Amino acid sequence: LRTVVLEGYAPGGQAGSSSLIENFFGFPTGISGGELAFRAQLQAYRFGAKFSTPAQALSLTLNGGEHRATLRVEGCNCLLHAKCAIIATGVNYHRLDAEGRENFECAGLYYAATAREGRLCSGSTVVVVGGGNSAGQAAMFLSECAKKVLLVIRGDGLSKTMSTYLSRRVAVKENIEILTNTEVKQMMGGKVLEAIELENTKTHERWMVQTPAVFSMIGAKPCTSWLPPEIELDDKGFIKTGLSVSNLATWKTVERPPGPLETSWPGVFAAGDVRSGSVKRCAAAVGEGGMAVEGVHEVLKTYS
């Protein structure tokens, strides 16, 4: 295959910004998301993949049996032709609904907990917002350098949203405090974040916390707004694949059923977090990528 990888920002997506991934096969002591993404890119280079970064996909069309992607590269629009396409555009972070939030983007409000952010908040009280694995991993990582970590969650506990192994570690870590039924209502400071206001959603009690850093890990929405209507989405905007699209009109004239990761548009596949029904884990995304490539080979056989 002659493969082109189009990347809007940097390889790895949400996984690439994770401070520590502990449940990826082959890394018993864990690995940072940035290091994993770097190794993956080197490996792809070795197998001949061509990378274009940054390259934003603006649209996707089908013309004469070829898929055509309109791209924005270095301020110019260009067109890329391919027999098959794999959509692995992932998700974008949700934003905190807190007064003053927009004043502290990258000046106290962060969406990744890496070594750089760890150094910035060394010895301080920091706040992690979210109840999923990303939030738990960030809290554990930051607890090694911060004086105290406040884990703010809207629910009653972590059991329904975080892996058991991780929630247990978070619960017994001495300098992590879990604040349930709590939301960030306001963010304050000068040029950088200095304090936030929290509210208990049950008692409506409010209080101030002095902190230089808030880490927002409250989920994300799929990056699918650029896709044509022919690519079927579920009610949350994730791409449908496999059996869920087999009865659609686009497949009525095709002599084969869609592959497990093939979309409503024959020859276009989806893998990773952007796909409806995906389990939102790095290992699963890698596996889906491998399955999608196998599906590409099967489609290309029809051209030979």
Image (tube, rainbow, N blue to C red):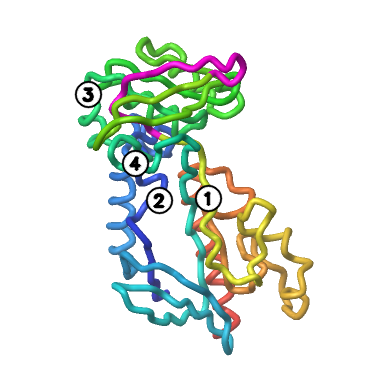
Q: Which residue is mark 1?
A: 273
Residues at badges 2 and 1 in contact (C-beta under 8 Å)? yes
Other-residue count near label 2 (Cα within 10 Å), few / some / many at <14 / 14–19 / ≥20: many
How far is disc 3 from disc 4 in space, using C-alphas? 22 Å
Foreground residue among 35 and 73: 73
Specify which label sits upstream in the sequence, 3 or 4: 4
Specify which label sits upstream in the sequence, 1 or 3: 3
Other-residue count near label 4 (Cα within 10 Å), few / some / many at <14 / 14–19 / ≥20: some
Q: Which residue is mark 3?
A: 122
Q: Which residue is mark 4?
A: 103
Can you tell which of label 4 and label 2 is closer to the viewer?
A: 4
Residue appearing at x 41%, y 27% in the figure:
128
Q: In the image, is 46 to the left or to the right of 28?
A: left
Can you tell which of label 4 and label 1 is closer to the viewer?
A: 4
Q: Which range of residues does the magenta coloring cover?
A: 200-215
Asked if residue 208 lies in the magenta stretch, the reply is yes
Asked if residue 243 lies in the magenta stretch, the reply is no
Residues at badges 4 and 2 in contact (C-beta under 8 Å)? no
Dividing the picture into quadrants, the one containing residue 115 is: top left
Element on which disc 4 rests: helix
Task: Report the amino acid beneath label 3.
Answer: Ser
Can you tell which of label 1 and label 3 is closer to the viewer?
A: 3
Specify which label sits upstream in the sequence, 4 or 2: 2
Residue 76 in the image: x percent, y percent? Answer: 33, 78
Specify which label sits upstream in the sequence, 3 or 2: 2
How far is disc 2 from disc 1 in space, using C-alphas? 10 Å
Element on which disc 3 rests: loop
